[in-house]
Image (tube, coloured by chain):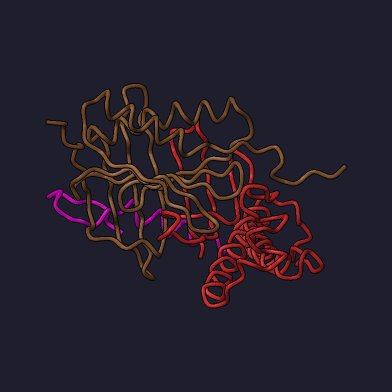
Chain colours: A red, B brown
Amino acid sequence: MNESDPTGLSWYDPSWVNSTVDSVGNFFSDPSRWRDEANYWAGFANGIVSTFTFGQEHVAAPYCDALSFAYGVGDGFGYATAAVGTATAAGAVLRIVDVSGAPVIGRSSVLFGRGGGLLNSNDIIRLGWGWVGSATTGQQVFRLAIGNSDAILHWHLDLF
Amino acid sequence: MSRSPTSNRKALDLRAAQVVAEAVGTELGVLLQTRVETQQPATSLVIEGPQPETARIILTTIEPGTLFLDIGTGIHGEWVLRSDKEVSEVTDVLRQIFAAVFQGNVVEEIQERPFGRLTISGSITTPSKTYKFKHYSADIPHTFTGTHRYAPYPAVE
């Protein structure tokens, strides 16, 4: 391959193309990269399966290396994906069904209750029932909140 | 003996906050209207200028120790209050925020997001600190998108 560009006008950068070809070639020629890839996806699957089975089921890494970095990274992304998917789906359902008075997850519940819920009463991060607007025109919201009186940033995500 | 989860909470007296807001308004020489609204389960203090271009402030308490703050279209903050010291600290923060809003030092930016969601970013600049608020919501009625600076409350003639 002639890599010269005497005019200096070509968009083609031979070094970029060659390095890409090298990377692809190395991937297929280096079994350790296959293992990393497989371990990553095993970890990703484990995050999702473990979330939805409440930790009862797990997916093992195919190369028996559940402590590998790739497995760990995939595992993290799997849990995050499951969490976001669950929150989105739950939000869609709970927009339709009024659960604000439910004893387990309602606005007076031990976990998410407004003012006293275990997950809804600390200064750093709160998950549970809140309120937006005035007494006469406002509404209950189930939200994730960060911030306190000392904080420069107050962050709120209304889930439903 | 068991304790209620909210037994160690301290409520901000909205009547006292109303007095603070009116005192700040008097100090700055601006016109404002205040009222306290109650409808179960909430009680709110509403502070607004006589013109719609000014930012309205709403403070709401429900269960003891809960305090929710809404300014303008969708700027939102909240606190959990556990002691008289925290009530005092929040009162000082509110005093600064009242003054900043009355002087027009509040900027709000609203962006529409997919699935009907909004991102509302607000900043309130006081002499000592700039408070930033970020609120993601689907249920805030809004009349504008983009960046909007609210007007100062008008001076008493």
Task: From the top left corner, tell me how far across and down residue A69 is, in percent.
Answer: 67, 50
- Give the side of residue A70 with respect to residue A20, left or right: right
- Give the side of residue B89 with respect to residue A31, left or right: left
The residue lying toward the viewer, choosing from B8 and B122, is B8
Task: From the top left corner, tell me how far across and down residue B38 is, in percent.
Answer: 47, 53
Residue drawn at 73 percent across, 55 percent down = A110
Task: From the top left corner, tell me how far across and down residue A67 is, in percent.
Answer: 75, 51
> Is A22 covered by the magenta stretch?
yes
Chain part drawn in magenta: A1-28
> Is A42 covered by the magenta stretch?
no
The residue lying toward the viewer, choosing from B98 and B23, is B23
Residue drawn at 34 percent across, 63 percent down = B113
In the rendered image, the quadrant that contains the C terminus of chain B is top left
Number of labelled discs?
0
- Give the side of residue B136 with respect to residue A76, left or right: left
Above or below — where is B87 with respect to B1?
Answer: above
Residue drawn at 27 percent across, 45 percent down = B55
Residue B95: name its quadrant.
top left
Above or below — where is A53 with respect to A149?
Answer: below
